[in-house]
């Protein structure tokens, strides 16, 4: 069996993690895992953790570490036969340490995008909740306004993309990301990409990953739903 590959993508809200994860999943056939999707699925299913998580998300806050690790780590332990890319976890040093004790990461991508760019992008971000597909009215609009390209279902905007919640989220990101980035830097697995346009950053990420994982056809792509 080919060697498994485990990666994490980090960056502030709106930095392009979802967009780039999708491209990586399609180009390299990794399972794409999103902590945000996982939390929202738990909210929709009214699980105990989902009900609790909702009270934090509504205030633009992170879900507490013990709730996140209890939700996510067992799921990762089930993925022993898959290569994966995680978007949205770890988001605190405690989560990074918990992840460390579960698996060895091969690579961490950190996106470094200016604040003004983030604000503009998020005010225009639309999402298909069931699949996690992300649109932007300027950058990658849906074929039919307000509808997902594949299912035709309605698109929504997240409450936490509203400017009031965004400022708190960005401040929080800056505070909590630094020690995580330092940790991965010290492990020699951190790769940082800076810029204002995903299309200009993508070729660099693509060529880095090409040296680390073999390309697969698009049919190998999978987005593993989290329970
Ligand atoms: N690892 C995590 N730790 C704590 N809370 C989390 C974590 N992942 C997701 N959440 C919670 O779920 C919410 C939605 O997650 P999602 O990843 O979609 O976040 P987001 O803040 O919209 O991120 P982005 O805009 O960067 O994609 C977050 O705002 C946060 O409250
Ligand atoms: N204008 C513009 N929008 C982008 C670019 N890259 C991503 N987006 C959009 O910006 C928003 C945030 O991107 P997303 O991938 O969701 O970022 P995340 O919050 O880090 O996961 C989405 O609406 C994307 O479609 C870009 O280069 N230019």
Image (cartoon, helix red, strand yellow):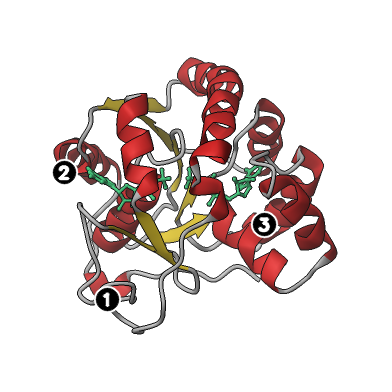
Q: Which residue is mark 2?
A: 199
Q: Quadrant of residue 148?
A: bottom left
Q: Nearer the viewer, mark 3 or mark 2?
A: 2
- 22 or 7: nearer the eye? 22
Q: Which residue is mark 3?
A: 77
Q: Is residue 66 above or below residue 190?
A: below
- Marks 2/1 in contact by CB < 8 Å: the verdict is no
Mark 2 closeness class: few <14, some 14–19, many ≥20 residues within 10 Å: few
User: Is residue 3 visible to the viewer in this orientation of the structure?
Assistant: yes
Disc ID at residue 219: 1
Mark 3 closeness class: few <14, some 14–19, many ≥20 residues within 10 Å: few
Q: Which of marks 2 and 3 precedes in the sequence?
A: 3
- Disc 2 residue lies near ligand 2 with CB under 8 A: yes
State the quadrant of the N terminus.
Answer: bottom left
Disc ID at residue 65: none
> What residue is drawn where x is 34% and y is 59%?
25
- Disc 1 residue lies near ligand 2 with CB under 8 A: no
Kindly report the distance in space between the C-alpha atoms of the residues bearing marks 2 and 1: 23 Å
Residue 54 x %, y %? 73, 55
Q: Secondary structure at mark 1?
A: helix
């Amino acid at each position: 069996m080919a060697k498994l590959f485990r990666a994490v993508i980090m960056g502030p809200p709106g930095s392009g993690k979802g967009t780039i994860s999708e491209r990586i999943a399609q180009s390299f056939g990794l399972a794409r895992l999103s902590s945000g999707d996982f939390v929202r699925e738990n909210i929709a299913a009214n699980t105990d953790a989902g009900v609790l998580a909702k009270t934090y998300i509504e205030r633009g806050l992170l879900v507490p570490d013990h709730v996140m690790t209890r939700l996510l780590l067992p799921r990762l332990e089930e993925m022993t036969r898959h290569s994966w890319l995680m978007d949205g976890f770890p988001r605190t040093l405690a989560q990074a340490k918990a992840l460390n004790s579960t698996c060895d990461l091969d690579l961490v991508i950190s996106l470094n995008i200016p604040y003004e760019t983030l604000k503009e992008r998020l005010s225009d971000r639309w999402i298909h909740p069931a699949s996690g597909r992300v649109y932007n009215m300027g950058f990658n609009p849906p074929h039919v306004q307000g509808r997902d390209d594949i299912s035709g279902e309605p698109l929504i905007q997240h409450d936490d993309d509203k400017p009031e919640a965004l400022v708190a989220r960005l401040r929080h990101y800056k505070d909590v990301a630094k020690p995580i980035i330092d940790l991965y830097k010290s492990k020699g697995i951190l790769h940082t990409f800076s810029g204002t346009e995903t299309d200009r950053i993508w070729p660099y990420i693509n060529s880095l990953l090409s040296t680390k994982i073999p390309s697969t056809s698009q049919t190998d792509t999978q987005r593993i739903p989290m329970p």
